[in-house]
């Protein structure tokens, strides 16, 4: 058990744990130093309890500890310098700990508060957790319990903050690389269109949005120079089946008979198109003549 001493009040400049850089030689990536640099606010109307917790925190190595005996100041203090942890007594005159949590929750717009409540009433623990507190410490204080619960909450909060920052970084990378790929694809498509004899694109409904060459004739949609019947029927069926099934294909050989009896031979490739959410957006293909007319 801890023993009380003459009450005093101290105030330290607050610095968030997130602002502490990781040491290159620190095996935990600076986590231990960041935890000790966390900003902590002690709120209790009993000066002896405040002094007790302040002394324990300083002896444990915490660097940024401040306190107040007036629960009505907590909201303003937290808004001015957001704390990584608030040690909050529940039984206080004027505004109890539940009232303080109501104010903090309204300001944050969230039920998840950086609060450990201090209580001697077992019946208040569940209510405090339901009100948004992360944990509780029973009165009278026990050194090990106080140290473990405070360290655990700060560690979880810091790791969660780092994970959120890492996820935001990954999301930015994905967006940047997606944009780069889209730009690269647009350039590739432009170069491809210049390098092939003809091409086409269709939207998700199958309507043609870009056509160059005998595509409509090939697909049996329109009569061409020599008529639809001049294309090899089996090859045409294979082509249309691939497009309707949204299957990709490469260098499908197609033949067309000309009026003088000679034949043209083409290599045709096609693929379905999808957006960044993997939603089908259409189909595109291109064709190259590989055997000149005779």
Image: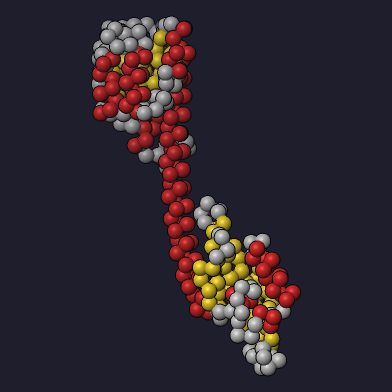
Marker count (numbered): 0
User: Where residue 244 sits in the image (x, y, percent)?
Assistant: 65, 63
User: Where residue 145 sits in the image (x, y, percent)?
Assistant: 46, 15
Q: Residue at coordinates 60% horizontally, 82% vertically from top-left?
A: 224
User: Where residue 246 sits in the image (x, y, percent)?
Assistant: 64, 61
Taking 246 as reference, is 24 left or right? Answer: left
Q: Residue at coordinates 42% horizontally, 35% vertically from top-left?
A: 161
User: Where residue 187 sits in the image (x, y, percent)?
Assistant: 46, 70
Which is nearer the eye, 14 or 4?
Answer: 14
Residue found farthest to the right: 234
Q: Which colour scheme is used?
A: secondary structure
Which is nearer the eye, 35 or 241?
Answer: 241
Which is nearer the eye, 252 or 80?
Answer: 252
Q: Is residue 275 above or below residue 254?
A: above
Q: Can residue 161 be seen in this view?
A: yes
Q: Is residue 293 above or below residue 17?
A: below
Q: Residue at coordinates 28% horizontally, 27% vertically from top-left?
A: 79
Quadrant occupied by the N terminus: top left
Taking 139 as reference, is 282 left or right? Answer: right
Q: Is residue 92 above or below residue 210?
A: above
Quadrant occupied by the C terminus: bottom right
Which is nearer the eye, 238 or 53?
Answer: 238
Q: Quadrant of residue 98?
A: top left
Q: Is residue 50 visible?
A: no
Taking 245 as reference, is 284 left or right? Answer: left
Q: Residue at coordinates 59% horizontally, 79% vertically from top-left?
A: 214
Q: Is residue 201 above or below residue 93?
A: below
Q: Quadrant of residue 223?
A: bottom right
């Amino acid at each position: 058990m801890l023993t009380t001493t003459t009450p005093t009040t101290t105030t330290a400049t607050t610095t968030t744990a997130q602002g502490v850089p990781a040491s290159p030689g620190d095996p935990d990536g600076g986590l231990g130093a960041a935890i000790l640099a966390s900003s902590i606010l002690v709120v209790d109307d009993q000066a002896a309890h405040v002094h007790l917790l302040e002394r324990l925190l300083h002896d444990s190595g915490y660097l940024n500890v401040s306190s107040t005996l007036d629960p009505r100041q907590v909201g303003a203090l937290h808004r001015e310098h957001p704390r990584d942890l608030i040690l909050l007594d529940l039984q206080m005159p004027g505004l109890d700990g539940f009232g303080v949590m109501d104010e903090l929750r309204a300001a944050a717009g969230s039920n998840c508060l950086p609060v450990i409540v201090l209580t001697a009433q077992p019946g208040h623990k569940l209510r405090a957790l339901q009100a948004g507190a992360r944990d509780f410490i029973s009165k009278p204080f026990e050194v090990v319990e106080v140290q473990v619960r405070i360290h655990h909450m700060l560690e979880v909060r810091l790791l969660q903050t780092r994970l959120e920052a890492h996820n935001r970084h990954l999301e930015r990378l994905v967006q940047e690389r997606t944009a780069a790929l889209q730009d690269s694809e647009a350039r590739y498509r432009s170069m491809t269109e210049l390098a092939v004899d003809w091409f086409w694109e269709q939207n998700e409904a199958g309507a043609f949005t870009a056509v160059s060459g005998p595509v409509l004739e090939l697909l049996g949609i329109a009569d061409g120079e020599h008529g639809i019947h001049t294309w090899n029927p089996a090859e045409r069926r294979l082509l249309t089946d691939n497009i309707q099934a949204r299957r990709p294909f490469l260098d499908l050989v197609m033949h067309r008979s000309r009026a003088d009896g000679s034949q043209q031979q083409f290599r045709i490739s096609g693929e379905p198109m999808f957006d960044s959410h993997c939603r089908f957006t259409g189909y595109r293909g291109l064709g190259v003549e590989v055997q000149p007319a005779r």
